Amino acid sequence: SKFKGPLVNQLWDMRLEAKRQAAASGAIDMDRPRPPSESITKIDYDFKGDEFLMERYRNPFGHLRFGNVLEDLDALAGNIAYSHVQDPTVNIVTASVDRIRLSGIVDLENNHQLSGKVTYVG
């Protein structure tokens, strides 16, 4: 959609491709336990190489628009949950965030990464 940010679009495209591949393989073992390492998902913010991306995330004060990161985090959580479930028929999952850690003001002149994984299933 034209209203989603570029990273949200990228995450949705990644999830749709994973669903297509899972549907094509037809071999989903729903009984096999999946370790958290199988759900690790990462997405990069290439602020150095993509000026448009950097400006999209810059607020009027020159700092990070954290609301945009929260939108990305929402899409990332969907990808993480899907990579755990791996069932192309599943459209709805519930995810929560355990922790958001910022170690200071985010420098938009450098690249950053958003990552996560399943930590609990119950």
Image (cartoon, helix red, strand yellow):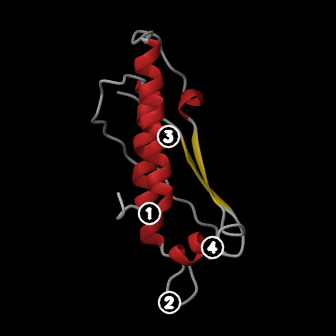
Q: Residue at x 53, y 32 (%)?
A: 39
- Which amino acid is tagged 1? Gly
Residue at mark 3 to residue at mark 2: CA–CA distance: 31 Å
The residue at 40%/9% (across/down) is: 31
Q: Mark 3 points at which residue?
A: 14
Q: Residues within 10 Å of mark 1 (few under 14, many from 20)?
A: some
Closer mark to the observer between disc 3 and disc 4? 3
- Give the amino acid at mark 4: Val
For the question of whether residue 78 can be seen, the reply is yes
State which mark lies toward you, 3 or 2. 3
- The residues tagged by marks 1 and 4 sit, at their Cα atoms, a distance apart of 19 Å
Q: Mark 2 points at which residue?
A: 60
Q: Residue at x 31, y 39 (%)?
A: 94
Residue 55 position, x and y percent, is 56, 78
- Which of the two discs, 2 and 1, sits closer to the camera? 1
Residue at the disc numbered 1:
5
